[in-house]
Image: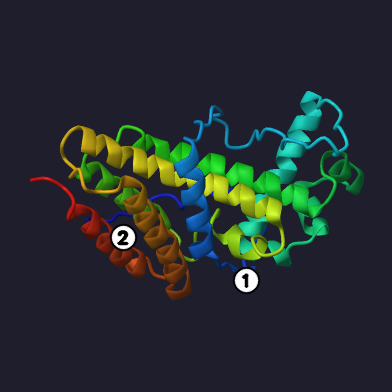
Amino acid sequence: MAITSGKSCDSPMALNVRGMNVRAGSDWASLAVHAAARVSKAPYPEATSTSTGNVKPMAEDDNAPQKRRLTPRGAITRDRLIQAAADLFYFKGVNSVTLDDVRAASGTSKSQFYRHFADKDELVHSVIELRAQQILERDRQHLERMNSFQALERWSDSIIRLNSLQDGAYGCALGALVGSRAAHDPAARNLLAEKFGEWQELIAAGLRRMQENGSLKEEADPAKLAVSVMAALQGSYLLAQMARDVEPMRLAMNMALAHVKTYTVG
């Protein structure tokens, strides 16, 4: 599959974070199983927002303190904090970023931060929402109407092309959050599982459409094939990051799609 240069995987906004060490990792095996289980129970709703900067507030439980209604200026400040944190987490790693770093990068004060977030965990949850929104909106362009193996190849090519811009240096902006949060932040792990489930379901839905039009064999299991493709994608992001080269990603995705192709008709 031909690969050309393009934008970065998750298109992080440029901030003054160049030169920071990259930190990434994933606990993908357990997350994929959890996400697959969630997908099998019920379909995930489509995201309705088209903005990459305006993130809806997290749902609060009955015991959580109620936030004040955001003014337009307050919403801008909150979005600025989330975007600054997202970029810092992507380049430097969640555990290496302090709240002082986020405030400095966003140009906000301590009182402004605590007006919108109770702590770092709550900020991380909002970053997960933002990154998932960005990625799902990007991939829906390829996957929502996918009904052929060639369309699946075009989606894979687009992912590799985007990651090639930085020679695979920073990995997946959503997957990188798994290793740093899944083990000790159950709320983050559940949210990540939900978002990966939505992403994975886009692939599975396309494979089901292929079954419906006769281009994928009836004995194929779209949900399981989607898990294999997503696992190859996340693993290849990590290998490309370590190698600073997208070739491992290309090889892994080609092999995952070759497995899918064994179930195609004609």
Place of residue 159 in the rendered image (x, y in percent of width and height, measured from the top left):
38, 52
Question: Which quadrant of the rendered structure holds the C terminus?
Answer: top left
Residue 52 seen by the camera: yes
Place of residue 41 in the rendered image (x, y in percent of width and height, measured from the top left):
49, 40
Q: Residue furthest bottom?
A: 243
> In percent of the image, x 67 and y 60: which residue is there?
181
Question: Which quadrant of the rendered structure holds the N terminus?
Answer: bottom left
In whole angstroms, how far apart are the C-alphas of marks 2 and 1? 27 Å
Q: Residue furthest right?
A: 111
Mark 2 highlights which residue? 253
Asked whether, in this view, residue 72 is left or right of residue 148, the answer is right
Query: Which mark is drawn over residue 118?
Result: none
* Three-letter code, disc 2: Met
Packing grade of label 1 (10 A; few <14, some 14-19, many >=20) is: few
Q: Quadrant of residue 246?
A: bottom left
Place of residue 179 in the rendered image (x, y in percent of width and height, measured from the top left):
60, 65
> In percent of the image, x 22 and y 33: which residue is there?
212
* Three-letter code, disc 1: Asn
Mark 2 and mark 1 lie on one chain; the one further toward the N terminus is 1
What secondary structure is found at the residue carrying circle 1? loop
Q: Nearer the viewer, mark 2 or mark 1?
A: 2
Nearest the eye: 91 or 31: 31
Labels 2 & 1 near each other (Cβ < 8 A): no
Q: Is residue 68 above or below residue 249?
A: above
> In percent of the image, x 78 and y 58: which residue is there?
101
Q: Is residue 70 above or below residue 96?
A: above
Mark 1 highlights which residue? 21
Asked whether, in this view, residue 109 is left or right of residue 181, the answer is right
Q: Is residue 235 above or below residue 111?
A: below
